[in-house]
Image (cartoon, rainbow, N blue to C red):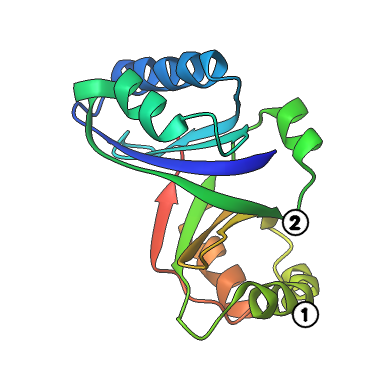
Amino acid sequence: MSLYLFEIVPAVTTKESATQIIEAVTTAAATAGAEVVESQVTAGQQRIFVVIEGNSDLGLENAIPSAVGDRAEQLTGPDEVRLVGAELEEIKKLRKGAGYLVEWDLPAEIDMETYLARKKANSPKYAEVPDVSFLRTYVREDTIKCLCFYDAPDEAAVRRAREVVSTPVDRLHELG
């Protein structure tokens, strides 16, 4: 089983619309024999991030866009991702949302091995920012970007945590 990321820009940015999109994705994934691991929505409902566990031959690349239909202005994925910093079974059990999501567009010179070594070396430094909890990261297997989830009191605290681990912030989203 692999993990796949879908990123959705809703055509209508309301809580109701985001809920309908997530329900449609969840149903389509289940029909295809896959499972939604988690879905996260930005505070203003401008973006939805959904991670699905399934086999590569399930047809998710057709099932999900078909289920979402015109409710999405833009839909990207499936992009295979790797979970780092957490156990999949724990994520499934908790279904707990994070407070913030950082997108980092990885430089071309960083491959997966380099990313994982860097992550391992830098993770202990988060202790220097005790008001921030690093929760998990999904790294695209093509190492185009990663999504890092945090619990923090505010955006400034997340930025401090990223500075401590010497990692940039390309986009920072408060999650709702």
Label 1: which residue?
Answer: 121
- Mark 2, other Cα within 10 Å: few <14 / some 14–19 / many ≥20: some
Q: How many marks?
A: 2
Q: Position of residue 164 (x, y in %)?
A: 64, 78
Q: In the image, what residue type sits under mark 1?
A: Ala
Residue in the picture at 78% in, 69% down: 127
Label 2: which residue?
Answer: 85
Q: Secondary structure at mark 1?
A: helix
For this view, does 97 lie left or right of residue 173? right
Q: In the image, what residue type sits under mark 2?
A: Gly
* Of the pair 27 and 11, the residue shown nearer to us: 27
To which quarter of the image does residue 162 belong?
bottom right
Residues under numbered marks 2 and 1 in contact, where contact means CB atoms less than 8 Å apart:
no
Q: Position of residue 71 (x, y in %)?
A: 23, 23
Residue in the picture at 43% in, 40% down: 6
Question: Does 130 appear above or below 121?
Answer: above
* Of the pair 104 and 56, the residue shown nearer to us: 56
Q: Position of residue 28 (x, y in %)?
A: 46, 17
